[in-house]
Image (cartoon, rainbow, N blue to C red):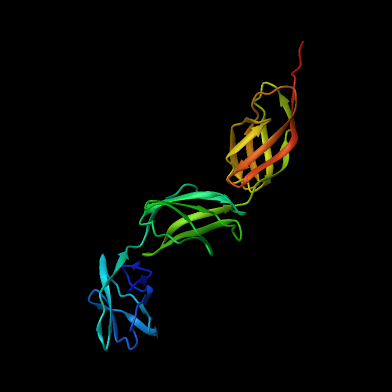
Amino acid sequence: MPISPNQGSTGGGTTVTITGTNLSGTTAVLFGTKPATNVTNVSPTQVTAVSPSGTGTVGVTVTTPGGTSNPVPFFYVGAPFKSGLSASSGPTAGGNTITISGTGLSTATGVSFGANTVTPTVLSDSQLSAVVPAGAAAGPVGVSVTTAGGTNNGLSYTYIDAPTVTTVTPTSGPTSGGTAVTITGTNLTSTSQVTFGGVAAPFSVIDATTVSAVAPPGTVGAVDVAVTNPAGTATDVGAFTYVTGPGI
């Protein structure tokens, strides 16, 4: 007499289907010593019921006017616990893969980012990977994991729009570097890198539209200025020109 699913939350509430023979007139379904609720005799070979709360492994039995069946095992599973995300932010377009760490994750069936749910890949009882779905808009959303034991919330993931660059001021400086440059654009709050011709420059975020950077040393000529955040990179082609200082 198989039961599906054969595991569920310690808090109860799991709807199970029990398949067997001579099930007409079912009067009770027990999980161990506890009666199930919402017992429905679907057919002579099938009964559905909702599990009560419990722990560990219990035997499930079906009682009809003809007697009580042999027990089949049902496993109670605790709710998952999440301890962290490998990345707490990413592009609003989604598509990046993150790892979720915790305990009790081996039966995970879904990971929700706000209102959007994806099917994870179970790596172990303590680790999942999931491809982040697209977000409705930039900003934080709650992350929840659903397993046979229930759903656990408590972590946050922030969707970020890719940066843009509109101006670089001043537009030139000496090849020795050291020029203080103001970069304006959009979505600059989470800037993680600024480069001049591919060379990383020291920078500080002023606000969502402004970043201050110091041009590193370079060679004579125009170079691209690029600003990167977790959602992508914006490049202003040839925005800064290295010039040779005067000689006497």
In this figure, what is the number of numbered marks? 0
Image quadrant occupied by the N terminus: bottom left
Please state if 52 lies on the left or on the right of 144 as rendered: left
Image quadrant occupied by the C terminus: top right
- Residue at 36% x, 74% y: name it: 13
Please identify the quarter of the rendering in which residue 42 is found: bottom left
Q: Is residue 191 above or below residue 46?
A: above
Depth check, front residue: 209 or 10: 10
- Residue at 48% x, 56% y: name it: 120
- Residue at 29% x, 84% y: name it: 28
Residue sitting at the far top = 248
Residue sitting at the far left = 33
Please identify the quarter of the rendering in which residue 170 is found: top right
**Where residue 166 appears, x then y in whole percent?**
73, 43
Please state if 152 lies on the left or on the right of 208 as rendered: left
Depth check, front residue: 180 or 195: 195
**Where residue 65 appears, x then y in whole percent?**
27, 89
Depth check, front residue: 106 or 26: 26
Please identify the quarter of the rendering in which residue 30 is found: bottom left
Please state if 70 lies on the left or on the right of 176 as rendered: left
Q: Is residue 97 above or below residue 242?
A: below
Q: Is residue 226 above or below residue 53?
A: above
**Where residue 177 appears, x then y in whole percent?**
66, 24
**Where residue 104 appears, x then y in whole percent?**
35, 57
Q: Is residue 155 above or below residue 166?
A: below
